[in-house]
Image (tube, rainbow, N blue to C red):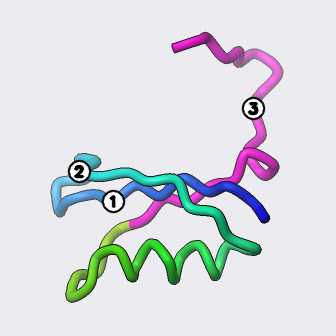
Amino acid sequence: MQTFRAYIQNAAGAVTWAAWIEADHRQDAESQASALCPGQTPMLDLWSATERKLADSCRLDPV
């Protein structure tokens, strides 16, 4: 299982909703995210921490 973050954006591109999704693969995560918004075609940005890469010049700060 991987943990994905799904962001749903409005037509202006502003994030209006976000959720953590547990899925075996990206396609399954996309299906789950789409099911959370029946009757809509959400814009989704899905990522997995195991797939996310940061440039050497980047650092993560605690929130």
Q: What label sits on residue 8 in the rendered view?
A: 1
Left or right, 1 with reference to 4: right
Q: What label sits on residue 16 in the rendered view?
A: 2
For marks 3 and 1, give the one nearer the viewer: 1
Residue highlighted by disc 3 = 54
Instruction: Between residue 16 and residue 21, name the one nearer to us.
Output: 21
Q: CA distance from mark 3 to mark 1?
A: 23 Å
Q: Residue at x 52, y 53 (%)?
A: 20
Left or right, 54 with reference to 33: right
**For the residue labelled by badge 2, is the local secondary structure a helix, a strand or a loop?**
strand
Whether 37 is drawn above or below 19: the answer is below
Quarter of image, res 44: bottom left
Residue type, mark 2 in image: Thr
**For the residue labelled by badge 3, is the local secondary structure a helix, a strand or a loop?**
loop
Q: Residue at x 64, y 81 (%)?
A: 27
Q: Position of residue 53 (x, y in %)?
A: 77, 40
Question: Going from the N terminus, do you reach mark 2 or mark 1 first?
Answer: 1
Dots 2, 1 in contact, CB < 8 A:
yes
Question: Going from the N terminus, do you reach mark 3 or mark 1 first?
Answer: 1
Question: Going from the N terminus, do you reach mark 3 or mark 2 first?
Answer: 2
Crowd tier of the residue under label 1, counting other residues whose Cα lies within 10 Å: few below 14, some 14–19, many 20 or above? many
**For the residue labelled by badge 1, is the local secondary structure a helix, a strand or a loop?**
strand
Crowd tier of the residue under label 2, counting other residues whose Cα lies within 10 Å: few below 14, some 14–19, many 20 or above? few
Residue range of the region highlighted in magenta in the rendering: 44-63
Dots 3, 1 in contact, CB < 8 A:
no
Quarter of the image for the N terminus: give it: bottom right
Residue type, mark 1 in image: Ile
Instruction: Between residue 29 and residue 43, name the one nearer to us.
Output: 29
Q: Does 25 lie within the magenta span?
A: no
Residue type, mark 3 in image: Leu
For marks 3 and 2, give the one nearer the viewer: 2
Quarter of image, res 47: bottom right
